[in-house]
Image: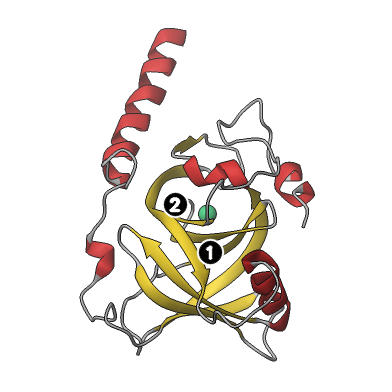
Amino acid sequence: MSLTKYNEKRNFDDTDEPKGKLGKSKEGLAFVIQKHAASHLHYDFRLEMNGVLKSWAVPKGPSMDPQIKRLAIMVEDHPYSYKDFEGNIPEGNYGAGNVIVWDNGTYIPADDSYNESAENKMKADLNKGHLSFILKGKKLKGEFALVKLKGQQENTWLLIKKEDQYASNEDILKKNKSVISRSTLEALEKKSEKMVTTAIEKKK
Ligand code: MN
């Protein structure tokens, strides 16, 4: 697990995103989903594993409907502290655009018949290309799976809700506020546009 790729892609003089450092939850394993209006709107799904956040970009966002499989593109590991990042990535930077923490919480492996630590169990399953886990989030709850597509590009996975009492066909994405600030992405966008305009005005 390395944060080299993460650090290489970013100029920390120019973005408020955290520098790549390993970190760890005191209790349980963290998960976070960030809603990110980069060149294309997507949801970043991240699972804490061995000091980093394993990360997938989900263009259409998660679904609570087991019939719906969502494409999830594995991207570079993100530092643990990225789970709290919300704000604006300035123009000209990698992933430029606004980010809110759409959901967060903890997760456990769905199958509890393992002897190693939960993290090592997840890491082994990650290498096998099939992760099953239970999310305890504010929006997402219950069992989900991430399944790597065979014969596809190396980084192509599917995010799937499993059948349980939390499965539903309500559109969970309608809950569009940050679980940290209660702000919507649109409200944050307006705020950062205003800040940019003010900064330009001041320079004149
Ligand atoms: Mn992203």
Disc 1 residue type? Ala
The picture places residue 61, in percent across and down from the top left corner, at 40, 67
Secondary element under disc 1, as helix, strand or loop, is: strand
Please identify the quarter of the rendering in which residue 98 is found.
Answer: top left
Residue at x 32% of width, y 46% of height: 178
Among the two numbered marks 1 and 2 on one chain, the one whose residue lies closer to the N terminus: 2
> Which label was assigned to residue 9?
none
Secondary element under disc 2, as helix, strand or loop, is: strand
Please identify the quarter of the rendering in which residue 183 is found.
Answer: top left
Disc 1 and disc 2 in contact, CB within 8 angstroms: yes
- Mark 2 lies on residue: 36
- Mark 1 lies on residue: 57
Q: Is residue 201 above or below residue 16?
A: above
Quadrant holding the C terminus: top left
Residue at x 39% of width, y 70% of height: 62
Residue 204 showing in the rendered view: no
Q: On the rendered structure, is 24 left or right of 46?
A: right
* Crowd band around label 1 with a 10 angstrom C-alpha radius: few (<14), some (14–19), many (20+): many
Quadrant holding the N terminus: bottom right
Q: Decide if ligand 1 comes within 8 Å of the CB at mark 1.
A: yes
Q: Decide if ligand 1 comes within 8 Å of the CB at mark 2.
A: yes
Disc 2 residue type? His
The picture places residue 20, in percent across and down from the top left corner, at 70, 41
Residue at x 36% of width, y 17% of height: 198
* Crowd band around label 2 with a 10 angstrom C-alpha radius: few (<14), some (14–19), many (20+): many
